[in-house]
Image (cartoon, rainbow, N blue to C red):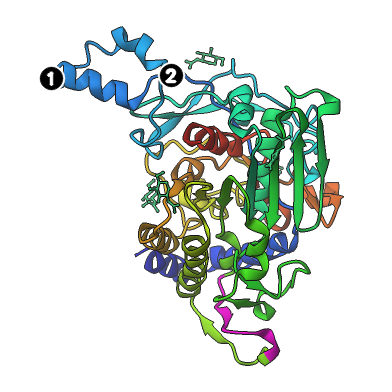
Amino acid sequence: MMITMMKSYRGKLHLPMLAGVVCALAFLVLLYNERISFLSSTSFMRFNTCAARRAARDATDGGRAKIDDMEEEDKLEYDADICDITEGRWVYNRSIKPLYSDRSCPYLDRQVSCVKNGRPDSDYRYWQWQPDECSLPRFDPNRALRKLKGKRMLFVGDSLQRGQWQSFVCLVESIIPKDQKSMKRGRVHSVFRAKEYNATIEFYWAPFLVESNSDIRIVGDPRKRILKVDSIAKHAKNWLGVDFLLFNTYVWWMSGLKINSLWGSFANGEEGYEELDAPVAYRLGLKTWANWVDSTIDPNKTRVFFTTMSPTHMRPVEWNNKDGIKCSNETRPVKKRGHWGSGSDKRIMKVVGEVIGKMKVPITLLNVTQLSEYRVDAHTKVYTETGGKLLTDEQKADPLHHADCIHWCLPGVPDTWNQIFLAHL
Ligand SMILES: *[C@@H]1O[C@H](CO)[C@@H](O)[C@H](O)[C@H]1NC(C)=O
Ligand SMILES: *[C@@H]1O[C@H](CO)[C@@H](O)[C@H](O)[C@H]1NC(C)=O
Ligand SMILES: *[C@@H]1O[C@H](CO)[C@@H](O)[C@H](O)[C@H]1NC(C)=O
Ligand SMILES: *[C@@H]1O[C@H](CO)[C@@H](O)[C@H](O)[C@H]1NC(C)=O
Ligand SMILES: *[C@@H]1O[C@H](CO)[C@@H](O)[C@H](O)[C@H]1NC(C)=O
């Protein structure tokens, strides 16, 4: 249905189609840029829990009268299993004080440091995610570090995952004295260490999770990328002995082209690959990952999380801004309930649900797609860098080619992802 809609949309409108092609190219260019990160809005919410609310509702036979009386109990627990965080709305709250800024946190990549890069509007930092049925506890850095004491946390995935990792590091680092923390950045593996807690918060670059010829040296032309959809060991051997493992993979599969999929070794010749549609190749790749988790991870020692698709916002007509250029002019979230654009592929979501649903090892899904879908305002847009350089004024004036509507400013939306993550830890 999604696909059909996109096709007819493209078929009917010629100008938008051209714009679509240009956007797709710009999208691919952005993807080359291995240095990705993001995000922007911390929620500080009350501690009402769904469980307590349900209990209250039950206790009053469907009435809501008792909810206020239950404030005290509400504060005691937050039941992440019961609260559905996907249904809710963004609430503007100018009193929010983000726990860090791109000037205070020394570990943020330039790519996501929107304020430093000249982003003039600031409203995007003052929205908090309010689920319908409960309130998320605010991100408490002390609680996060207590959970991490003597432990390793590893984020694995692409540049959006790197953004979530940097967000997590920045959310906790300000309460750690200077001589008690360190950061070692590597091309593939980066480690933030909180010494007095004997804890690490790490990132491992594997944009497809499975192996490809474009993992470390990025192959710019998507047609020349080849994925070994059945191979993961080379990366996965670096994911052992970790207490909290968090994965993602999505946007790299979405070049719009078929995925060159190879079985077995590259040495057999790169000619022997098969071209598969993205959801088909994605399913094979994700199953390879699932098999590795099920055969390797001891759920008593390691907890495994998976962050769902991070939406891209390339087509403003989808949120009724006919004059927009990608997300470049957006300063407010989309209001329309359930807004869902073509930047979040429902076929991929279905694969994630099916593959993870059949796994032996329990996976905690951080289903952030819907809440992020609303946030057309929170991408880095032209306040970013390309190839290690800030955009020039000329490039900034040309958002059609240069606005990044994939990555998120930090502080920003990935802070909310981590708020949800911490609530589930
Ligand atoms: C707005 O944020 C402040 C600071 O976090 C908080 O005390 C207040 O309760 C929030 N207001 C609403 C309506 O949630
Ligand atoms: C620090 O944590 C690691 C696990 O990440 C553990 O193996 C080691 O024993 C811990 N060291 C101390 C001194 O607690
Ligand atoms: C995990 O712990 C439970 C209870 O302690 C035990 O029954 C189970 O066999 C353990 N699972 C594994 C995979 O070791
Ligand atoms: C949209 O953004 C461009 C620059 O990115 C700016 O020149 C233009 O005035 C903006 N248009 C509106 C309607 O805000
Ligand atoms: C994530 O949430 C959306 C609704 O926001 C839902 O449609 C989707 O099925 C969920 N994904 C999974 C894998 O459960």
Task: Inspect this view and state whether residue 405 appears.
Answer: no
Q: Position of residue 257 (x, y in %)?
A: 57, 75
Amino acid type, residue under disc 1 in the picture: Asp
The label shown at residue 339 is none
285 relative to 405 in the view: left or right: left
The label shown at residue 61 is 1
Compared with 30, 166 (above or below) is above
Q: Position of residue 60 (x, y in %)?
A: 16, 15
Quadrant hosting ligand 2: top right
Q: Does the CB distance between marks 2 and 1 fall below 8 Å?
A: no
Which contiguous range is marked in magenta? 256-267
Q: Is mark 1 within 8 Å of ligand 1?
A: no
Q: Residue at x 55, y 60 (%)?
A: 250
Foreground of the two, 390 or 203: 203
Amino acid type, residue under disc 2 in the picture: Phe
Image quarter hosting the N terminus: bottom left
Task: Inspect this view and state whether residue 142 appears.
Answer: yes
The disc, 2 or 1, on the residue closer to the chain's N-terminal end is: 2
Compared with 320, 350 (above or below) is below
Q: Secondary structure at mark 1?
A: loop
Q: Position of residue 292 (x, y in %)?
A: 52, 65
104 relative to 409 in the view: left or right: right
Foreground of the two, 61 or 129: 61
Q: Residue at x 80, y 39 (%)?
A: 117
Q: Secondary structure at mark 2?
A: loop
The label shown at residue 47 is 2
Determine which quarter of the picture holds residue 164.
top right
Q: Seen from this angle, which residue lies furthest left?
A: 61
Q: Residue at x 41, y 51 (%)?
A: 362
Compared with 116, 327 (above or below) is below
